[in-house]
Amino acid sequence: MKKIPIRTCIGCGSERPKQELLRIVRTAGGEIFMDPGGKSNGRGAYICKNPECLQRAWKTKGLDRSFREAVSRAVYERLEKEMTAYADRG
């Protein structure tokens, strides 16, 4: 039996299989973006496919903690648009 990797959502704190969560990446150059494939290089943080979790992560500074740097509100807004576009694609 193959072990299923479990990750924790930075918004709600629920532990889920890696495939059920979206990965957000900060590259060495400081760029932050959504990584639906989960293969990009950089430090990753996982979040549920629910915009409410992203709002909760902003309120609790979840990305700031995960990436060990301040993340601006503009980045959260851009990620929310990317998340909505990803959800629309299915």
Image (tube, rainbow, N blue to C red):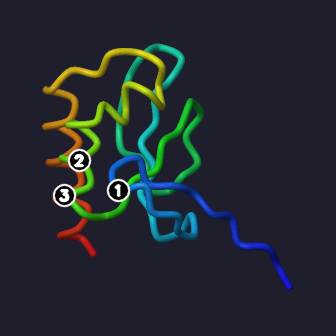
Foreground disc of the pair 3, 1? 1
Q: CA distance from mark 3 to mark 1?
A: 9 Å
Q: Secondary structure at mark 1?
A: loop
Numbered mark located on residue 56 in the image: 2
Snapshot quadrant of residue 58: top left
- Mark 1–mark 2 CB contact (< 8 Å): yes
Snapshot quadrant of residue 31: top left
Residue drawn at point x = 54 percent, y = 52 percent: 38
- The residue under label 3 is 52
Q: Position of residue 63 (x, y in %)?
A: 37, 33
Amino acid type at circle 2 is Arg
- The residue under label 1 is 12
Q: Earlier in the sequence, mark 1 or mark 2?
A: 1
- In the picture, measured across the screen, residue 57 lies left or right of residue 55, that is right
- In the picture, measured across the screen, residue 65 lies left or right of residue 89, that is right
Snapshot quadrant of residue 2: bottom right
Q: Position of residue 44 (x, y in %)?
A: 53, 39
Q: Secondary structure at mark 3?
A: helix
Amino acid type at circle 3 is Glu
Residue drawn at point x = 45 percent, y = 63 percent: 14
